[in-house]
Structures are given as C-alpha cells and as structure tokens.
Amino acid sequence: MKIGDFGIAKRLDRADRLQQEELLGTPAYVAPEQIEGRGPIGPAVDIYALGAILYECLTGRPPFEANTVAEVLLQVRQEEPKPLRDIRPHLPRDLEWICWKCLQKTPTQR
C-alpha cells in the first residue's frame, strides 16, 4: 500500500471568496466537520484522515463503506467504524486506541 498527499486547493474569485461550495476529498477519509461545513478546518482534520488511513492499513478496508458517496458521508457523520479488534483480534490495544482516538467525531477529542 502506498500513501500520497496531493493536498487540496480551492479556487478563489477576485474577492477571495469561494465561487461555489463543494466537498473536496475522499469521502471515507473526510472529517465530519468538513462534511458539515462547520468550524475552522485545522490540524484535527488531518488527524482524522490519518486515523482513517491507519484503520485501512490495519484492516484492509476503509472505516466506512457504502454503495453511494452520500451513504459514506452519512456514516462518517453519524456512525462509529467497526471496532478494529472485531476485524483483527490480536491487534495491540494501544494501536487500536490511537486509531479510535483519531476517528473521534468531535475535533477537540482527537
């Protein structure tokens, strides 16, 4: 597995305002506050994405999967991912805790 960070950029008009609101990012790795458009976007968003990447590295699947993007986004906002130890029973508890902490819904809890 390879991980790359291509960054996210938004086009601004001359008044430095967004021309249109749109969600940028891969749905299963986007933090809940990005989906909801609330609060400032800061380091907590990157911590969430790191937790989602760690989850997939440890389990072979992203923390949230569904048939449509809308369903994935709803899961990210409202559901908890399947516990890591349900998928990998012998996973060290400390590693499981780190991943779980990164995937907290509230940015201040990450």
Image: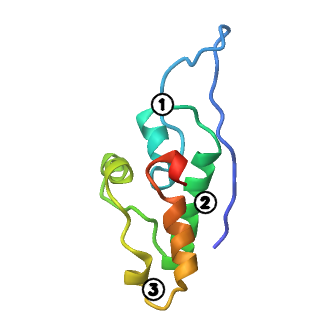
Say which mark, if any, is on residue 79.
none
**Which tag is nearer the camera, tag 1 or tag 2?**
2
Say which mark, if any, is on residue 88.
3
Image check: 105 left or right of 17? Answer: left
Residue 68 drawn above or below residue 86: above
The residue beneath circle 2 is: 50
Spatial separation of the CA atoms under disc 1 and disc 2: 22 Å
The percent position of residue 75, horizontal first and vertical second, equals 33, 54
Residue at 49%, 66% (x, y): give it: 100
Residue 16 picture quarter: top right
Mark 1 belongs to which amino acid? Glu
Q: Earlier in the sequence, mark 1 or mark 3?
A: 1
User: How has the structure been colored for display?
Assistant: rainbow
**Which tag is nearer the camera, tag 1 or tag 3?**
3
The percent position of residue 87, horizontal first and vertical second, equals 40, 82
Say which mark, if any, is on residue 22.
1
Q: Are marks 3 and 2 in contact (CB under 8 Å)?
A: no
Residue 28 drawn above or below residue 1: above
SS at mark 3?
Answer: loop
Residue 3 picture quarter: bottom right
Q: Residue furthest bottom?
A: 90
Q: Residue furthest front?
A: 109
Q: Earlier in the sequence, mark 3 or mark 2?
A: 2
